Image (cartoon, rainbow, N blue to C red):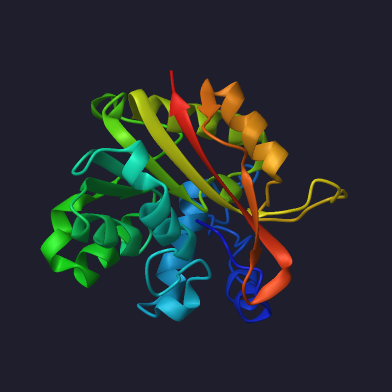
Amino acid sequence: MLESNRPGNRSSTDAISNPLPKVDSTDLSPIRPLTNAEWCEGVYCAADGDPERVPWCHRGPDGLLLKWLANEAPRLVRPGCRTVVVGCGLGDDVAELAARGFDVVGFDVSTSAVRWAARRFPSHANRFLVSDLLDLPARMVGRFDLVVEVCTLQSVSPELRATAAASLARLAAPRGVVLAISCGKHADDVGPEEGPPWPLSATDLENLMAGAGLASMRPVAEIPCIDDPDHVRVMGAFVRG
């Protein structure tokens, strides 16, 4: 989900990255940190209907996803296959896959995002669901021939990444394909990172998916961003055994 290193986008999240929940003056219990679901919901609510205020909104389907669909997908997945978009946000990737004939649904942890996506794409409103990657409902497990994850792993705190990757694998049917696209970093980039997003190197993504029982179909690609060659994205397709 969270994929933006543009200076203009950073300010839109800084103000709500650590908002303090309101508490009763008589409540002396510690203020708990926001969950990922609460943080995401806060971003969409604060956007107040303006996609420009959602830092990971591309105003269209993801460019790397489009390239993968054109060049790689035809040899890996059958037409019309069952597909799920994880962290579907405002729905562009779901709408694109539906237009290409995929039997697709998308889910997001944010109720506001799902309602917004349904308003943007009313003919696909029934394709958008509220669900949490970290707490999947049983009806989704093992169901999908293609699992599409664009900028979701990078938005999950590093200590929860392995759990998120395992859930991606659980969504896939046997021999199902998992496509992962993330804000990237070079392998030699070290040092503390503040997020979200928390970028992944190609090796990070490869190892994360291997730990979830997913085999890489080819080496994970490290792709320079068109508008900023100093930044990269990583993309890999994996198969569930």
Q: Is 46 left, or right, of 76 in this rendering?
A: right
Residue 219: image location, x then y, percent: 62, 38
Q: x and y percent of residue 205 in the render?
A: 63, 38
In this picture, is 120 found above or below 2?
Answer: below
Q: Residue at x 36, y 37 (%)?
A: 76
- Report the residue at 19% width, 51% height from top: 127
The quadrant holding residue 79 is: top left
Nearest the viewer among 17 and 75 is 75
Left or right? Give the position of 85 relative to 230.
Answer: left
Number of numbered discs present? 0
Q: Residue at x 45, y 69 (%)?
A: 57
Please tell me in which quadrant of the rendered image residue 20 appears: bottom right
Residue 73, above or below 123: above
**Quarter holding the C terminus?**
top left
99 relative position to 8: left or right: left
Side of 163 where 11 appears, left or right: right
Which residue is rendered at x = 68% and y = 47% of the image? 200
State the image coordinates of residue 88 (x, y, percent, origin top left): 36, 54
148 and 54: which is toward the camera: 148
Does residue 45 sit above or below 196 in this rendering? below
The answer to whether 210 is drawn above or below residue 228 in the figure is above
Is residue 113 visible from the viewing direction of this image?
yes
